[in-house]
Amino acid sequence: MPLSIATWNINSVRLRIGLVAKLAEEHQPDVICLQETKTPDDRFPLKEAAKFGYPHAAIHGQKGYHGVAILSKRPFDDVSRQGFCDMGDARHISVVLGREAGLSAPLTIHNFYIPAGGDVPDPEVNEKFRHKLAFLDEATAWEHLHPQDPAARSVLVGDLNIAPLEADVWSHKQLLDVVSHTPVEVDKLGRLQAAGQWVDVMRNFIPPQEKLYTWWSYRAADWAASNRGRRLDHVWATPALAPTARALTVLREARGWERPSDHVPVIATFDA
């Protein structure tokens, strides 16, 4: 049975719930993973999500900052949330889809919003960058992200706030000392990926040498013309699940929607 999963840093779900509805109407993903929802749980627009076809929701939010959520057409078998760095930030949520969702075997979806890291790539002078590196270290050590069962079916999606490959940024040389593409961040993201033997599903569809972006800054006067993007949003899958990926869509046009997020949705479809 095909299962489509969308991931999107929505940059305030209450402000842009209409854009989530547009995504749902036009592309009908089975699951929508949102990051940077920026709202406490009791103010999340659950009724609106149910109206456009997503009655099942797992949310982990906080007032004004961060926040993650998973909206689904199908029911969950389990929901869990993990904290990192003792910060109290809402940056992770996971769900398990199983028989009630029509799947032959359980499938876990991890939704992450990794810290952006501020502007200065020096942990000695920038606490935000130090936090980002510590978060990556803790996530790498977290046993739930490196299952021992070779048949484990898991997906890790989200705004990981790192563009690891040269073709994931508009200029590799000019961004080497810019937060999100520095060697230390790329190395730590690689360690996180290797710890769980995670497969980069997006790059299975789009060769690593081809430019691929999911984020364009609000600072650009004309984001499309300048096209100075970065791939900050990712879809990873365990080795048992990755070969079942059958389609991938990066909705570049969403960056041009009215009052857009600076990120665009990515949709991956698996034979689950």
Image (cartoon, grey):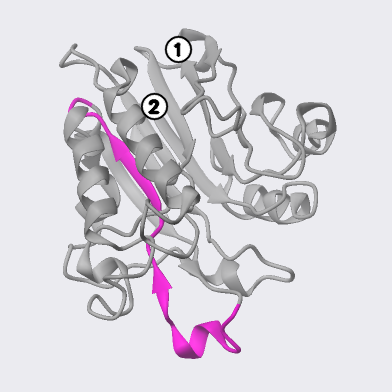
Q: What residue is drawn where x is 42% and y is 73%?
A: 229
Q: Which residues are magenta?
A: 219-240
| Label drawn at residue 131 | none
Is 73 part of what is drawn in magenta?
Answer: no
- Relative to residue 1, is residue 264 drawn left or right? right
Type of the residue with mark 2:
Met
Q: Position of residue 102 (x, y in %)?
A: 47, 16
Which numbered tag is attached to residue 1? 2
Give the camera-side residue of 65 and 29. 65
Viewport quadrant of the C terminus: top left
Measure the alpha-carbon separation of dots 2 and 1: 12 Å
The kind of residue on which mark 1 rests is Gly
Is disc 1 placed on a helix, strand or loop?
A: loop
Q: Residues within 10 Å of mark 2 (few under 14, many from 20)?
A: few
Q: At numbered mark 2, what does the secondary structure look like: helix, strand or loop?
A: loop
Where residue 3 sits in the image (x, y, percent)? Answer: 43, 33
Which image quadrant is residue 150 in? top left
What residue is disc 1 on?
A: 98
Question: Residue 236: within the magenta?
Answer: yes
Alpha-carbon neighbours of circle 1 within 10 Å: few (<14), some, or many (≥20)? some
Image x and y of residue 233, in percent: 42, 53
Q: Is residue 20 above or below residue 50?
A: below
Foreground pick, 204 / 226: 226
Which of the two discs, 2 and 1, labels the residue nearer the N terminus?
A: 2
Give x and y (percent) for residue 224.
51, 84
Q: Nearer the viewer, residue 85 or 141?
A: 85
Residue 125 is drawn in which quadrant?
bottom left
User: Can you say whether 176 is above or below 48 in the image?
Assistant: below
Q: Residue at x 18, y 63 (%)?
A: 207
Residue sitting at x 46%, y 9%: 99
Quadrant in the picture for the N terminus: top left
Query: Mark 2, mark 1: which one is toward the viewer?
Result: 1
